[in-house]
Image: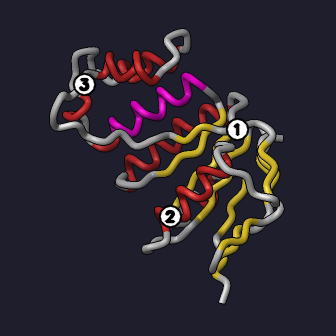
């Protein structure tokens, strides 16, 4: 077991209980709105082990797929990003180069949102097979592509929690959980 959640309550919301095991993907629908980012960061901190919650046991800390912020001044190349963020011994460290037009010298700030998300995903997967991710800023086609890449990892024994704001992946996951508002 990776994560054991007996129910997370905060202010005006409740995340129902669930367990996450190897080879599973849990979709947590946080719904859209002004609460999304704050709730996402709150849950990320719990599942990565950065903070504790009395109702959650994290048996194996997970890693969040961080967004890559464009750097206008002193932009870095894909190669430098991977040297800084990825485990060079992992096959994932060079997987981004399977995209025909991406090379070691490609500037990260020239990558579109999907390519930046894939770069961050591969760097994270080079470190661990247990991840937390979101699909913020992705169009439906690109979101599905990223989700399928994560599913390949899950089928190989990894685990994942998708912090989402819609139910698009409801039928494609191991467990689907919706945030509940408390009145």
Q: Does 136 sit left or right of 175 as displayed? A: left
Colour convention: secondary structure
| Magenta segment includes 144 | no
The residue that mark 1 highlights is: 61
- The kind of secondary structure the magenta stretch mainly shows is helix
Earlier-in-chain disc, 1 versus 3: 1
How far apart, in angstroms, are the residues tagged by discs 1 and 3? 29 Å
Residue furthest toward the bottom? 183
Give me the residue at 54% from left, 59% from top.
40
Q: Quadrant of residue 79?
A: top left
Q: Secondary structure at mark 2?
A: helix
Per the rendered image, the range of residues in magenta is 115-127
Q: Does 172 sit left or right of 157 as displayed? A: left
The residue that mark 2 highlights is: 38
| Magenta segment includes 125 | yes
167 up-or-down from 19: above or below = below
């Amino acid at each position: 077991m990776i994560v054991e959640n007996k129910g997370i309550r905060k202010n005006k919301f409740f995340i129902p209980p669930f367990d996450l095991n190897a080879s599973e993907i849990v979709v947590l629908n946080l719904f859209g709105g002004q609460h999304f980012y704050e709730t996402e960061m709150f849950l990320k901190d719990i599942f990565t082990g950065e903070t504790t919650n009395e109702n959650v046991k994290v048996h194996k800390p997970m890693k969040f797929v961080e967004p890559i912020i464009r750097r206008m001044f002193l932009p870095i190349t894909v190669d430098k990003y991977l040297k800084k963020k990825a485990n060079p011994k992992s096959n994932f460290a060079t997987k981004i180069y399977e995209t025909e037009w991406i090379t070691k010298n490609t500037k990260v700030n020239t990558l579109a949102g999907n390519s930046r998300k894939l770069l961050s995903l591969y760097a994270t997967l080079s470190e661990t097979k247990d991840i937390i991710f979101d699909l913020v800023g992705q169009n439906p086609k690109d979101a599905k592509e990223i989700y399928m890449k994560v599913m390949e990892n899950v089928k190989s024994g990894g685990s994942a929690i998708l912090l989402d704001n819609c139910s698009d992946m409801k039928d494609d996951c191991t467990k689907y959980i919706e945030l509940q508002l408390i009145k």
